[in-house]
Image: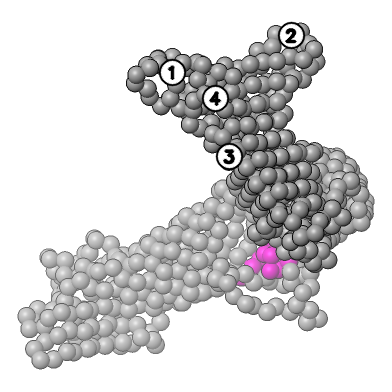
């Protein structure tokens, strides 16, 4: 038996009508089915809406919501002003013109598949429309519909006539079927695989960055004005290929995205997703970074190569039976195969705590490489496991491996926190050999790193008198901030992915700048520092320069992902035959003087010993260094302990 429900909108508590003075109000009705029938199997007695029919000249806005609700704004005398304008019958929501009112807003929690917009209606959609199987949009009799959200899914039938207009901001559909008549118009932007058009001479289709693969011309009438695109180029553009290079992956999963992938052979389109995605870019299917929703994507065939960015999680919900496949995972990403996987040659690259899990795997040859305590769970049988000795992948699960081959790299790999173009060749001159590739990925136990650091320099406030000649009660030897920079090579030994040892050699320059007037003097053949007492000397700029060959030894520990701490010591050897020395510029009356006491100034200790500690992310570090030995020789100048705070690439 057909049931019919008439929903009357009621005023909120506190509202009252006044025939003389009225206020504009908004009233709300949650669309709940009040049918009390015992026919529980009848789907129309639930609170679902399958189609929406809009037959009103009031402006209508349709938005998404957590429930189905309608809002009417206007000035009302009593309930007769809006009675009967909203009817829910057999899953169809009918919106008619009330006696009074200015605008209508409809919030839909349901995924409605059909909309009928008739008789001077004006509707704006902000809600995304997802077509599960087939959908229908009909706009007639001087009406207009604007879809500002996404319209996605399988097949959509669109009909316009009698001076009506539709504007689609973005469509991603498998099949779009258009029927236009009597001065109607459709604007399109987006993509469809199959476009069908049946229109008369008075109507038109306007394309704005719109593409399609196939155009059905059998129904196109005289006057058809849309162009046929190069379908061959479009097919090549969207072709999926089995490429093993991670940079040429068929599918890119953006960082922190959550995706379920299903493979299907019975599809006309390349993919179907429950929410809009970035789509194809240069032949690759791309899912954008930080996607806020859980995606389900159906693809018409299995994919040869997937790259999964940092923090993303991908679940494969279909069986795989192919000759070769490869998967590349970035930091803390995860790939789960919930069905059987049978692949003759399988390549997996895991990086920095990424994870791959197979419910059941059978493969003749499994090639793996990775770092950063990654995890591979295998349940099944492997013919040959091909891996690098130091790949640092933890194998777990119930598996059988018939044979294992471990690759060992004996030569040193070279990496650099500062990008360098270092051309390395193996003994056969092959720059692209597996060995060189492994070296560039930093998978060896031993590497060479180029390091650079820069810091601000000072010395301890505890300046003590060493001899009576240059003692001063007024802290004349106070410094302005100086400079300290170092460049060198460091040999890195990886105990494991979290703990490393660094030792190396470098060149360091330290410039100490005095805040007060300091001069150079000579006493008994010794070059000494002294405080300038001549009142005629103005604007003195004095500094001393100390340069060292350094030998650092440090330990680095990664405590969370790429975050690390380091600590160690630095041995410095001061050398004489350089510009190490004293420099000063100053003004006197009618003159400007520069002084340099270079390699003849030899009052620095020949050896210094420093301790260093710091905090870093990847190759970038902040550090603190403090000297355990005074800067100057015994019984020379003043006793100071230099320290510096700075930033480094490498440790």
CA–CA distance in space, label 1 to label 3: 26 Å
Residue shown at 89%/47% (left/top)? 265
Residue occupied by mark 1:
77
Which residue is located at x 91 percent, y 49 percent? 321
Seen at 43% across and 60% down, the residue is: 623
In terms of sequence position, does the residue under pointer 1 or pointer 2 come before the other?
Answer: 2
Q: CA distance from mark 2 to mark 4?
A: 29 Å
Q: Quick one: SS at disc 4?
A: loop
Residue 482 occupies quadrant: bottom left
- State the scheme by which the image is colored: one colour
Residue 113 picture location, percent across and down: 73, 35
Q: Local crowd at mark 4 within 10 Å, few (<14), some, or many (≥20)?
A: some
Please tell me whether residue 251 belongs to the stretch shown in magenta. Answer: no
The boundaries of the magenta stretch are 438-448
Disc count in the image?
Answer: 4
- Left of 352 or right of it: where is 534? left
Nearer-N-terminus badge (4/1): 1
Give the vertical position of 564 relative to 583 (above or below).
Answer: above
- Give residue 362's position: percent from left, percent from top: 91, 47
Callouts 3 and 2 close, C-beta under 8 Å: no
Q: Which residue is mark 2?
A: 37
Q: Going from the N terminus, do you reach mark 3 or mark 2 first?
A: 2
Res. 66 visible in picture = no
Indicate the quadrant where residue 51 lies: top right
């Amino acid at each position: 038996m057909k049931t019919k429900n008439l929903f009357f909108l009621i005023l909120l508590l506190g509202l009252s009508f006044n025939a003389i003075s009225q206020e504009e109000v908004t009233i709300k009705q949650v669309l709940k089915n009040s049918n009390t029938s015992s026919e529980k199997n009848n789907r129309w007695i639930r609170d679902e809406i399958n189609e929406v029919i809009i037959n009103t000249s009031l402006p209508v806005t349709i938005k998404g919501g957590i429930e189905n609700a309608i809002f009417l704004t206007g000035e009302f005398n009593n309930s007769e002003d809006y009675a009967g304008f909203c009817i829910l019958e057999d899953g169809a929501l009918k919106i008619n013109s009330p006696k009074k009112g200015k605008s209508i807003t409809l919030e839909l929690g349901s995924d409605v598949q059909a909309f009928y917009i008739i008789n001077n209606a004006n509707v704006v959609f902000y809600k995304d429309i997802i077509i599960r199987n087939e959908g229908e949009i009909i706009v007639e009799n001087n009406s207009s519909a604007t879809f500002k959200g996404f319209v996605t899914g399988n097949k959509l039938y669109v009909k316009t006539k009698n001076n009506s207009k539709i504007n689609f901001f973005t469509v991603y559909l498998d099949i779009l079927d258009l029927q236009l008549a009597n001065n109607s118009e459709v604007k399109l932007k987006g993509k469809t695989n199959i476009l069908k058009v049946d229109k008369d001479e008075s109507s038109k289709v306007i394309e704005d960055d719109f593409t399609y693969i196939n155009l059905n011309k059998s129904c196109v009438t005289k006057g058809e004005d849309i162009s046929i695109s190069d379908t061959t180029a479009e097919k090549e553009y969207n072709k999926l290929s089995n490429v093993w290079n991670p940079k040429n992956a068929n599918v890119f999963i953006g960082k922190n995205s959550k995706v379920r992938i299903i493979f299907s052979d019975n599809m006309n389109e390349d993919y179907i997703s429950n929410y809009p995605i970035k789509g194809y870019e240069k032949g690759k299917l791309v899912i954008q970074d930080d996607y806020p929703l859980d995606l389900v994507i159906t693809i018409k065939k299995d994919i040869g190569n997937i790259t999964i960015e940092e923090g993303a999680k991908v679940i494969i919900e279909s069986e795989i039976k192919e000759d070769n496949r490869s998967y590349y995972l970035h930091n803390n990403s995860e790939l789960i195969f919930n069905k059987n996987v049978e692949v003759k040659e399988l390549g997996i690259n895991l990086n920095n705590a990424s994870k791959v899990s197979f419910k059941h795997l059978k493969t003749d040859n499994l090639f793996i490489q990775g770092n950063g305590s990654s995890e591979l769970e295998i349940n099944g049988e492997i013919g040959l496991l091909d891996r690098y000795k130091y790949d640092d992948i933890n194998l777990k699960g119930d598996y059988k491996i018939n044979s294992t081959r471990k690759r060992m790299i004996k030569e040193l790999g070279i990496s650099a926190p500062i990008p360098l173009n270092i051309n390395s060749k193996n003994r056969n001159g092959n720059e692209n050999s597996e060995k060189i590739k492994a070296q560039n990925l930093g998978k060896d136990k031993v590497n060479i790193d180029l390091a650079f650091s820069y810091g601000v320099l000072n010395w301890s406030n505890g300046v003590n008198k060493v001899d009576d000649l240059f003692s001063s009660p007024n802290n004349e030897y106070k410094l302005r901030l100086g400079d300290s920079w170092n460049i060198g090579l460091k040999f890195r030994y990886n105990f494991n992915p979290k703990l490393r040892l660094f030792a190396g050699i470098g060149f360091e320059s330290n410039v100490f700048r005095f805040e007060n007037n300091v001069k150079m003097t000579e006493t008994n053949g010794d070059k000494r520092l002294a405080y300038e007492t001549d009142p005629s000397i103005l604007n003195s700029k004095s500094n001393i320069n100390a340069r060292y060959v350094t030998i650092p030894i440090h330990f680095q520990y990664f405590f969370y992902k790429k975050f690390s701490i380091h600590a160690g010591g630095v041995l410095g050897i001061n050398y004489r035959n350089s510009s190490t020395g004293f420099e000063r510029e100053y003004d006197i009356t009618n003159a400007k003087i520069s002084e340099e006491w270079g390699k003849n100034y030899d009052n620095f200790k020949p050896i210094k010993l420093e301790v260093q500690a710091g905090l870093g992310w990847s190759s970038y570090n902040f550090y603190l260094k403090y000297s355990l030995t005074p800067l100057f020789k015994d019984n020379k100048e003043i006793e100071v302990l230099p320290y510096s705070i700075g930033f480094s690439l490498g440790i």
